[in-house]
């Protein structure tokens, strides 16, 4: 059988393709639920002290093999005029922290003075994450009213929104004084990326289910009635919503080693499946099943953003084309997955190709799941510039890695129309119009393609055999670019092969890429700079989690549940 190479970075790392990625077996939510089920984690609600107005706190504890972690949730009675998903908001319907262990009364007292204030408060190394969430008001009121009246909520309304609350930020890794990543990275349960944040959201979803039931119970008692219990089959499709804006976009540019490891794991998984000499009957059956169930998600996916509407319409056409093609596809032929993948490259859009790539991994957990162990990266240590590298060697690297950037005319205003900077008010990334706003002096180094082209031009008259250290003594302003080129030389999937400051750049492509690795679904951009998603939709709640339902829950069945 011929060897099949991983796809080159120049193919994979274009923004249009990165903005078409889908969740997969390697997504961080699924990595977590598989681990918790495999290790037999135990969950309990230890405190639920919330009044009829929906004000108070609750504690949910997850007991792993060696340690316990507790979500401490604070519920608030938020006036409607203060509810906002923007990062500049100062009040929320609920605020949370993931506590390292089981909090004592004095911990709760301390946290109650800080967590509700988010950025205005401070936490300690005992806290692993800080987050906040707002209700989806109309659906929240509908569910409370229906349950309080002794009825179940309307499944159609539930499906149209998909969540009762949406987080507007889930901070970890030292934010606001919380524990640094390095303090917990050695724990097996947190070795994979973003496991703290994924655990926090998983427990938050449980709290939201309990809170809406509590509010319905209180409303029913006030009316002299008994509320209905929310049907588990109706509750399970509900996920946690999330509103994510520009603050997330630069992450991929600022963490090239980590980004490289994510993409490398996915590309190696695709390669391993494509190289399979045969497809067993059971493996084909799993693939067909998850594909059919994924089509249910495509049918229910709603968006009002023109770009995503077009992509979704094309993806649905791709799904129909793939379904028809499978009637004739020979799974008994040599390397049948490679043949299917090559057919998709010739006939489907980027959305369809990457959707198929994720689905192809599903029957092969035993083959690819171990790759998730290599998706983390030690980004704490500084990367020393190899000053002994020659100018000729560096020039060759730039030409190999950044050929697209060297072909770009950076004197054309449209190619440098945007500039990334950090807002003074919230210290959050922003993307402004270079030629319309006085922001260029504050520009962040988030245009590696342009910087590589500038470095290449600066090297033009330097002899090939001169060491790069000598060049940098004369031109220290290029140090960050030299360092980056040397990093990308060993981490080829760490660089986006596109212009990140052009007039046509869509930051939502970067958001979509990162969120797909989280395991998000139902991408719904609200502009080219922020997006709403759903997390853990169809997942088993902690009291339902088992090895039987810990993996394929992301794919709904016709009745709305996952499995």
Image (tube, grey):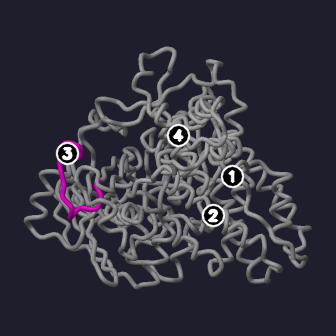
Label 4 SS: helix
Q: Tell me the residue that label 3 is attached to.
A: 117
Q: Quadrant of residue 144?
A: bottom left
Magenta highlight range: 118-130
Q: Tell me the residue that label 1 is attached to.
A: 9
Q: CA distance from mark 3 to mark 1?
A: 43 Å
Category of crowding for the residue at label 4, using alpha-carbon neighbours closer than 10 angstroms: few (below 14), some (14–19), many (at least 20):
some
What residue sits 44% from the left and 64% below the top?
235
Up-down relation of residue 160 to residue 7 (above or below): above
Badge 2 or badge 4: first in the primary sequence: 2
Whether residue 232 sits left or right of residue 337 in the image: it is: left
For the residues bearing labels 4 and 1, Cβ distance under 8 angstroms = no
Q: Is residue 447 magenta?
A: no
Image quadrant holding the C terminus, namely: bottom right
Q: CA distance from mark 2 to mark 4?
A: 27 Å
Q: Tell me the residue that label 4 is attached to.
A: 481
Label 2 SS: helix
Q: CA distance from mark 2 to mark 3?
A: 38 Å
Q: Nearer the viewer, residue 237 or 363?
A: 363
Up-down relation of residue 543 to residue 249 (above or below): below
């Amino acid at each position: 059988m011929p060897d099949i190479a991983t796809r080159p970075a120049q193919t994979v790392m274009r923004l249009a393709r990165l903005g078409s990625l889908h969740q997969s077996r390697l997504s961080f939510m699924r990595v977590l639920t598989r681990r918790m089920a495999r290790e037999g984690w135990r969950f309990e609600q230890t405190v639920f002290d919330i009044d009829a107005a929906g004000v108070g706190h609750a504690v949910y504890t997850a007991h792993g093999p060696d340690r316990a972690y507790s979500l401490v949730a604070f519920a608030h009675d938020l006036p409607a005029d203060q509810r906002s998903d923007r990062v500049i908001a100062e009040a929320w319907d609920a605020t949370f922290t993931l506590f390292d262990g089981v909090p004592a009364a004095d911990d709760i007292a301390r946290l109650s003075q800080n967590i509700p204030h988010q950025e205005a408060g401070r936490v300690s190394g005992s806290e692993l994450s800080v987050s906040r969430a707002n209700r989806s008001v109309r659906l929240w009121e509908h569910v409370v009213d229906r349950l309080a009246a002794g009825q179940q909520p309307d499944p159609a309304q539930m499906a149209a929104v998909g969540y009762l609350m949406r987080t507007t930020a889930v901070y970890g890794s030292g934010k606001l004084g919380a524990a640094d990543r390095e303090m917990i990275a050695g724990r097996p349960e947190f070795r994979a990326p973003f496991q703290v944040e994924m655990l926090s959201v998983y427990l938050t979803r449980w709290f939201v289910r309990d809170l809406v039931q509590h509010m319905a119970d209180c409303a029913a008692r006030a009316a002299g009635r008994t509320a209905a219990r929310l049907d588990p089959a109706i509750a399970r499709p509900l996920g946690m919503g999330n509103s994510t804006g520009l603050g997330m976009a630069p992450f991929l540019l600022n963490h090239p080693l980590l980004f490289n490891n994510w993409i490398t794991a996915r590309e190696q998984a695709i390669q391993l499946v494509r190289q399979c000499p045969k497809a067993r009957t059971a493996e084909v059956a799993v693939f067909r099943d998850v594909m059919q169930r994924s089509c249910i998600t495509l049918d229910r996916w709603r968006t009002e953003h023109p770009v995503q509407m077009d992509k979704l319409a094309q993806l649905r056409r791709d799904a129909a084309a793939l379904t028809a093609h499978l009637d004739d596809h020979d799974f008994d032929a040599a390397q049948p997955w490679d043949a299917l993948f090559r057919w998709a490259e010739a006939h489907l859009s980027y959305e369809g190709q990457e959707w198929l790539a994720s689905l192809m991994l599903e029957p092969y957990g035993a083959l690819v799941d171990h790759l998730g162990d290599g998706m983390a990266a030690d980004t704490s240590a500084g990367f020393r510039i190899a000053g002994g590298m020659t100018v000729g060697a560096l020039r060759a690297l730039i030409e190999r890695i950044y050929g697209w950037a060297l072909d770009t005319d950076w004197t054309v205003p449209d190619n440098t129309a945007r500039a990334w900077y950090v807002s003074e008010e919230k210290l959050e990334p922003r993307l402004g119009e270079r030629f319309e706003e006085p922001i260029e002096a504050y520009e962040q180094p988030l245009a590696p393609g342009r910087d590589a082209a500038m470095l290449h031009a600066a090297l033009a008259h330097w002899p090939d055999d001169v060491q790069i250290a000598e060049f940098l003594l004369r031109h220290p302003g290029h140090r960050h670019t030299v360092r980056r080129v040397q990093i990308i030389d060993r981490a080829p999937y760490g660089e986006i092969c596109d212009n990140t400051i052009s007039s046509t750049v869509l930051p939502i492509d970067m958001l979509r890429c990162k969120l797909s690795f989280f395991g998000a679904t139902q991408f719904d951009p609200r502009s080219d700079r922020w997006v709403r998603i759903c997390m853990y939709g169809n997942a088993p709640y902690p009291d339902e989690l088992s090895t039987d339902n810990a993996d394929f829950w992301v794919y709904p069945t016709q009745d709305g549940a996952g499995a």
